[in-house]
Image: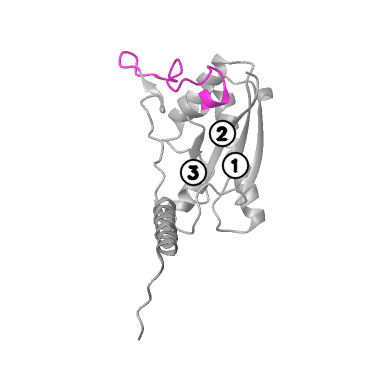
């Protein structure tokens, strides 16, 4: 067998190509960091009264009353149990914080998007998503938000936020997402 020897210009092209491939493969395998939930991501419990209120001010630098302010400082999504549209206990403080924020900015309008995991028929999941969105809407109305400011829609299983068929992905996809649609 005759050994292969590349000329110097060709060898530098090979080395450059290998370096580019190494950098590209490293970047492709890099994992994006999940944004950390800051102290303002969840409602704050008052020590003296025991009541839960939405954070005041904008920790993120987002314009107060904006969609970014709502998403970052109040949190825009609540989760549901399998085949259920009942508001879970862990969702109530978040919905109360959403209601407080919406009362603070009365010109803001929202859309509640009901979602489901991939299990079940399209029709079943659209109906379940609608019941989830209505449950959130009813909670916000009971907390003092005008019904005229809230619209609902169901996406069923059509807009998953987590890919895959694992229980963890299913749990993330069983949600109601509150989206600021107008106002500030």
Q: Residue furthest bottom?
A: 1
> Pointer 1: what residue?
114
The residue at the point 65 percent across, 49 percent down is 126
The residue at the point 46 percent across, 25 percent down is 73
Instruction: Determine whether, in the image, residue 56 is placed left or right of residue 102.
Output: left
Q: Residues within 10 Å of mark 2 (few under 14, many from 20)?
A: many
The stretch in magenta equals 46-70
> Pointer 2: what residue?
136
Mark 3 and mark 1: span between their CA atoms? 10 Å
Give the mark nearer the N terminus: 3 vs 2: 3
In the picture shown, does residue 100 fall above or below 178? above
In the picture shown, does residue 84 fall above or below 49? below
In the picture shown, does residue 9 fall above or below 69? below
Give the mark nearer the N terminus: 3 vs 1: 3
Q: Residues within 10 Å of mark 3 (few under 14, many from 20)?
A: many
Residue 139, image x, y percentages: 55, 29
Question: Which image quarter holds the N terminus?
Answer: bottom left
Mark 1 and mark 2: span between their CA atoms? 9 Å
> Pointer 3: what residue?
80
Q: Nearer the viewer, mark 1 or mark 2?
A: 1
Q: Residue furthest left?
A: 47
Badge 1 marks a residue whose secondary structure is strand
Could you tell me if the residues under marks 3 and 1 are in contact, i.e. CB atoms within 8 Å? no
């Amino acid at each position: 067998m005759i050994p292969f020897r590349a000329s110097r210009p060709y060898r530098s092209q090979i080395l450059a190509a290998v370096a580019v491939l190494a950098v590209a493969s490293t970047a492709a395998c890099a994992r994006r960091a999940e944004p950390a939930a800051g102290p303002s991501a969840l409602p704050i419990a008052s020590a003296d009264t025991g009541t839960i209120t939405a954070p005041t001010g904008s920790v993120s630098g987002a314009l107060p009353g904006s969609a970014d302010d709502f998403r970052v400082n109040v949190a825009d999504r609540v989760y549901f149990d399998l085949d259920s549209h009942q508001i879970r206990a862990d969702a109530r403080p978040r919905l109360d914080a959403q209601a407080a924020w919406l009362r603070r900015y009365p010109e803001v309008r929202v859309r509640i998007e009901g979602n489901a995991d991939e299990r079940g028929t399209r029709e079943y999941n659209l109906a379940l998503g609608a019941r989830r969105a209505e449950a959130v809407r009813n909670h916000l109305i009971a907390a003092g938000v005008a019904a005229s400011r809230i619209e609902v829609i169901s996406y069923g299983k059509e807009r998953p936020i987590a890919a895959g068929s694992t229980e963890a992905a299913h749990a993330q996809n069983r949600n109601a997402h509150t989206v600021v649609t107008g106002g500030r």
